[in-house]
Image: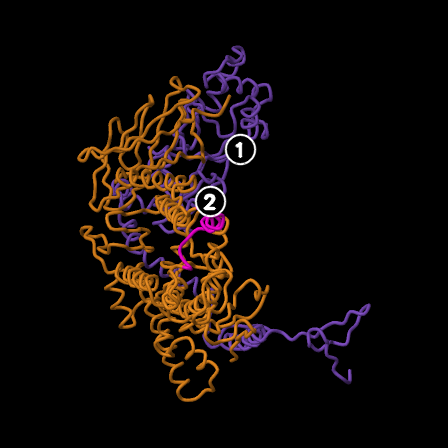
Chain colours: A purple, B orange
């Protein structure tokens, strides 16, 4: 465009573009807007110099401040740990029963235990420790391996059927799967288990199963089916069923002998964390 | 910088009447010259003198004194609690106001206070117009203060207009520099005082002085210095006209019986110059001297009628009274009056003031009711409190013997400044056992020590035997202070298991 065209009405220069007789004005940007625009560019250049900005092949420009969000988080976590150190030490020194009677320490252990539970345990046992089929409910008063503070701490430390050499260990055989008992015998045993848990069952089957139970089950579950904590064998006479209370569920359990695995937390969590977890789980309600 | 002066044949400067100089002020914000968007035309308000100006000075002194003095008032609350009378303690989540201490859970007191302020504003508005805008709004007070500084340094209206038009010589530079220096000092003192409401004032002053206050404090001071400087020095009337919602709300809420600064057009019109010896028959008292426009800090002409820009400061009343005295006419051609009265006078009726109207009765009623509720709740406020949250995950726990257990998290609050022994009990349920984590099984109310001004969290487990379960259970947690005879009961429910 050789000569500038000025619009009569607005007094503004046009771009020279015209559509159906309508000409586009080349209205200049407001001054303040332009000023801000240039200021942001200058700011950006300053930012590149001071802060990490440009990616390289294997690294990036670190900037004069050598700022790193990751380092900040690490420093924050470290300072948080330092702030907690005193109480954590006190927790480490105190016995489990001492923690129970010291309100200050108890509050700290409960808070720490709740966090650790959410991070490590809730995946299987549920956010409230309510359990699921195959994963014990930690709120009730039924404990496979004992519900005293010390028992809970030990179970958390070594795990169940875990890789730890001291692991809590027990094995329910798959009586049907491994061909130890015949299907008809297993059906009779199902009636027997229903019978000991105070429900009506086929009397003939119960009679036939009585010697079978004594030979195959009583060693772990006890002659009356009341379970045995040293073996982690559940009580068959109460209202709690880890794998379900229906005849089908009981048959499935006798046939296959399910047994879950709980990892050992000994090496992964600090002794203080395990203590706090034990106190927290104990406080859920079932603690003995 | 150019000065925009509209000179039209009938608005030529000169004498409006014997001894009355006609001002060349133009109403920059009058409806006729208003556009959807335009740059601000500077306003150079002339200094007024009279009753309203004096009242405005008094209100300025009063409100500024409150602002600066309040953080320094002390109030003894005993050891361990701050002794500042008014303090917003953000770090410890407490608000102190003389004998009142409010916790975050009690934010409804703040809501009540806001409702009170709003209704009081409505009532004042229905009775006397925009008293708040004209005399007590911080924007008004600080703008007035800034204009006063400007007048002292640069002179009155005409001198300021001349200075603005003058080239940048030593005189102009010196005056402008000192004006902005004083403005910034005032702005700094404004921002500096604000932070004292959030911290212990003497401690913070010391820290501010020796540079050890936190970055947040300095940022707050800097931010408020900046806003005070710009709002008071530069934006001024634009804040009221464009930024504040109240003029619009007020316009929708006002009626013709509300007092406001009014030009009595029934008396003033037809306006025009008046020559010495001329009679007053067949014409109005207004000599069109524009003095009311010259003094207006909002840049309007009150003779155009009620406008949202008008803050009802009454400075035009003072200016006009002066003129009326000079020309021997009665005062108050511009006055606090109502639109209804003008119509009454025009139709030959007597003016009357109706302060008792449905809306004023309503506002006064709401004001009294909310005040009473606030007073009662504050007077009978519990110094101990109890919150009960029932476990939802899991909702209930079935035990080996078929009994059902529910868990509750209790928050025991001690709002006094001393540690207290509070007694916690459970009533209204036939429980197999009640267990307090940390205290074991309980059969009767158990003593709980709660630290001064603190909340203690306690978990309670309640078990109901299978044979005692109904479709629904209710129970009551009772927290009592036996020494002082205060108690708090909170109802909760017990879930007896899943629906069968």
Residue placed most toward the observer, A2 or B253:
B253
Specify whether residue B344 is painted magenta.
yes
Residue placed most toward the observer, A109 or B385:
B385
Q: Residue A182 in the image: state x and y as whole percent.
A: 59, 22
Secondary element at tag 1: loop
The residue lying at 36 percent from left, 37 percent from top is: B409
Q: Which residue is mark 2?
A: A263
Q: Residue A280 in the image: state x and y as whole percent.
A: 36, 41
Secondary element at tag 2: loop
Which callout, 1 or 2, points at the residue further toward the start of the chain?
Answer: 1
Q: Chain of mark 1?
A: A
Q: Chain of mark 2?
A: A
The label on residue A258 is 1
The answer to whether residue B143 of the structure is visible from this angle is: no
Same chain? Circles 1 and 2: yes
Please provide the residue range marked out in magenta: B333-349
Q: Quadrant of residue B428?
A: top left
The answer to whether residue B463 of the structure is visible from this angle is: yes
Q: Residue furthest bottom?
A: B170
Instruction: Classify residue A226 as left or right of residue A101.
Output: right
Q: Residue B166 in the image: state x and y as whole percent.
A: 46, 85
């Amino acid at each position: 465009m050789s000569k500038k065209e000025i619009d009569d009405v607005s007094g503004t220069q046009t771009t020279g573009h015209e559509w159906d007789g309508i000409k586009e004005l080349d209205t200049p940007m407001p001054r303040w807007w332009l000023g801000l625009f240039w200021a942001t560019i200058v700011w950006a250049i300053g930012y590149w110099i001071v802060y990490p900005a440009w990616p390289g092949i294997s690294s990036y420009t670190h900037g004069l401040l050598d700022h790193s969000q990751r380092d900040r988080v690490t420093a924050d976590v470290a300072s948080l740990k330092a702030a907690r150190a005193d109480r954590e030490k006190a927790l480490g020194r105190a016995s489990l029963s001492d923690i129970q009677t010291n309100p200050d320490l108890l509050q700290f252990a409960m808070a720490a235990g709740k966090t650790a539970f959410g991070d490590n345990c809730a995946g299987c046992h549920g956010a409230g420790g309510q359990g699921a089929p195959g994963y014990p409910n930690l709120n009730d008063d039924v404990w496979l391996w004992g519900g005293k503070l010390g028992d809970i701490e030990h179970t958390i430390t070594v795990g169940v059927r875990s890789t730890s050499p001291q692991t809590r260990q027990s094995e329910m055989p798959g009586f049907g799967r491994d061909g130890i008992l015949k299907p008809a015998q297993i059906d009779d045993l199902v009636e027997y288990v229903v019978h000991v848990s105070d429900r009506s069952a086929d009397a003939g089957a119960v009679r036939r199963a009585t010697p079978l139970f004594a030979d195959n089950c009583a060693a772990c579950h006890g002659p009356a089916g009341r379970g045995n904590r040293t073996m982690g064998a559940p009580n068959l006479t109460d209202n709690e069923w880890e794998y379900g209370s229906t005849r089908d569920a009981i048959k499935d359990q006798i046939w296959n002998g399910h047994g879950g695995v709980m990892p050992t937390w000994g090496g992964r969590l600090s002794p203080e964390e395990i203590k706090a977890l034990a106190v927290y789980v104990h406080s859920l309600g079932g603690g003995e | 910088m150019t000065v925009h002066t509209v000179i039209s044949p009938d608005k030529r400067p000169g004498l409006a009447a014997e001894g009355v100089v006609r001002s060349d002020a133009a109403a920059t914000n009058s409806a006729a010259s208003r556009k959807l968007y335009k740059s601000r035309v500077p306003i150079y308000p002339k200094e007024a003198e009279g009753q309203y100006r004096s009242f405005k000075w008094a209100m300025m002194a009063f409100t500024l004194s409150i602002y600066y003095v309040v953080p320094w008032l002390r109030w003894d609350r005993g050891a361990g609690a701050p002794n500042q009378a008014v303090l917003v303690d953000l770090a410890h989540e407490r608000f102190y106001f003389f004998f009142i201490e409010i916790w975050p859970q009690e934010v409804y007191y703040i809501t009540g206070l806001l409702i009170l302020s709003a209704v009081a504003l409505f009532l004042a508005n229905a009775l006397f117009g925009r008293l708040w805008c004209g005399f007590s709004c911080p924007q008004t007070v600080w703008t007035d203060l800034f204009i006063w500084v400007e007048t002292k340094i640069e002179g009155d209206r005409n001198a300021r207009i001349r200075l603005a038009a003058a080239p940048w010589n030593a005189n102009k530079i010196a005056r402008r520099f000192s004006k902005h220096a004083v403005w910034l000092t005032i702005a700094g003192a404004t921002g500096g005082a604000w932070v004292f409401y959030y911290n212990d004032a003497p401690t913070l002053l010391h820290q501010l002085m020796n540079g050890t206050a936190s970055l947040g404090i300095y940022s707050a001071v800097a931010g408020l210095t900046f806003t005070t400087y710009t709002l008071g020095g530069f934006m001024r009337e634009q804040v009221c006209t464009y930024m504040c919602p109240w003029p619009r709300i007020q316009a929708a809420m006002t009626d013709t019986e509300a007092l406001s600064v009014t030009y009595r057009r029934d008396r003033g019109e037809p306006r025009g110059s008046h020559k010495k010896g001329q009679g007053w028959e067949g014409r109005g008292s207004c000599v069109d001297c524009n003095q009311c426009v010259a003094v207006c800090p909002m840049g309007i002409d009150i003779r155009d009628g009620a406008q949202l820009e008008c803050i009802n400061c009454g400075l035009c009343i003072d200016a006009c009274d002066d003129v009326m005295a000079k020309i021997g006419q009665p005062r108050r051609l511009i006055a606090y009056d109502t639109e209804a009265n003008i119509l009454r006078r025009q139709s030959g009726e007597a003016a009357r003031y109706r302060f008792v109207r449905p809306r004023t009765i309503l506002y006064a009623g709401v004001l009294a009711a909310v005040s009473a509720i606030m007073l009662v709740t504050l007077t009978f406020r519990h110094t101990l409190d109890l919150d009960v949250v029932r476990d939802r995950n899991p909702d209930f726990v079935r035990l080996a013997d078929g009994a059902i257990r529910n868990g509750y998290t209790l928050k025991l609050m001690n709002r006094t400044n001393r540690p207290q022994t509070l007694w916690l009990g459970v009533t209204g349920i036939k429980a197999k056992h009640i267990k307090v984590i940390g205290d074991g099984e309980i059969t009767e109310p158990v003593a709980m020590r709660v630290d001064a001004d603190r909340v203690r969290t306690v978990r309670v487990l309640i078990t109901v035997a299978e044979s005692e379960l109904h479709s629904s259970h209710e129970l009551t947690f009772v927290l009592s202070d036996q020494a002082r005879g205060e108690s708090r009961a909170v109802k909760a429910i017990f879930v007896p298991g899943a629906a069968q």
